[in-house]
Image (cartoon, grey):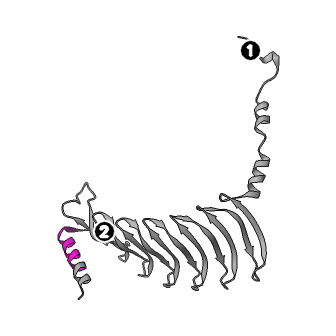
Amino acid sequence: MNKLTLITLAIIGTTALHAELFTEHFKNGVVKSQINYKNDTHTDTEEGVKDGLEKTYYNTGEVAYTVTNIEGKRNGPMDWYDRDGKHLERINFKMGKRDGNNKIFYADGTLRIEVNYINDNKEGVERYYFSTGKLASEVNYVHGKKEGIQKEYNEDGTLNNEVTYKHGYKEGEKRWYDKKGKVIKTLTYKMDRPINLMKKVQAKKPDATVKALKGLDFNPNNRKVD
């Protein structure tokens, strides 16, 4: 047993000494949750400070998710499962905030989505996958906002479309491609809005001056004299 393992066990043991396990049930008697709280903090009127392992169940008895809390904050991996016990998602926390690699899976265990978090913000490349395991899309994040080129693919691996993001907004030309890589459609964006659509909307709006004049009554007979 190495030094790190001994330290981890010591921390768990210390936490256990200062925690109380509370179990809640559904109306049918099935366990709903098992949560450790700091001693004397959980009462009939107060939620309390979660400290230690937390488990939540479906009303049919299967585990829905597990996570560890420290001083009321999630810390470490939070794992979600479906009713068949299949792993759906892993979210990593660091003292209450998402921190680390987040993964979502298909029912068969194939990776569906992956992205890294730092201090509750997406950082780095987020990737989506088809159920076959092939890449469906990818885009980079900086401080929780899309930044750079987003690419979406067909299941055969060919590029379907691409567009550039700046500070979380589509900016510039979005291009769609056929299976041979030829551009078949384009649309230009400004601050996430398609420019052509914006022009059409603006063309339908009446001139502000004309609109204001239409609201005025120029008939001298209708004017009031103070």
Q: Is residue 200 left or right of residue 39?
A: right
Q: To which residue does mark 2 refer? A: 69
Segment tinted magenta in the rendering? 8-20
Q: How many marks?
A: 2
Q: To which residue does mark 1 refer? A: 224
Residue found at the far bottom of this picture:
1
Is residue 14 within the magenta segment?
yes
Foreground of the two, 11 or 200: 11
Which amino acid type is marked by label 2? Answer: Asn
Q: Main secondary structure of the magenta part?
A: helix
Which amino acid type is marked by label 1? Answer: Lys
SS of the residue at dot 1?
A: loop
Please give the name of the residue rendered at 77% of the width and 35% of the height, measured from the top-left corner.
209
Q: Position of residue 103 (x, y in %)?
A: 47, 77
Q: Is residue 153 left or right of residue 127?
A: right
Is residue 204 within the magenta segment?
no
Please give the name of the residue rendered at 44% of the width and 82% of the height, measured from the top-left corner.
86
Q: Position of residue 211 (x, y in %)?
A: 77, 35
Foreground of the two, 112 or 45: 112
The relative height of residue 137 versus residue 211 in the rendered view (above or below) is: below
The relative height of residue 39 versus residue 219 in the rendered view (above or below) is: below
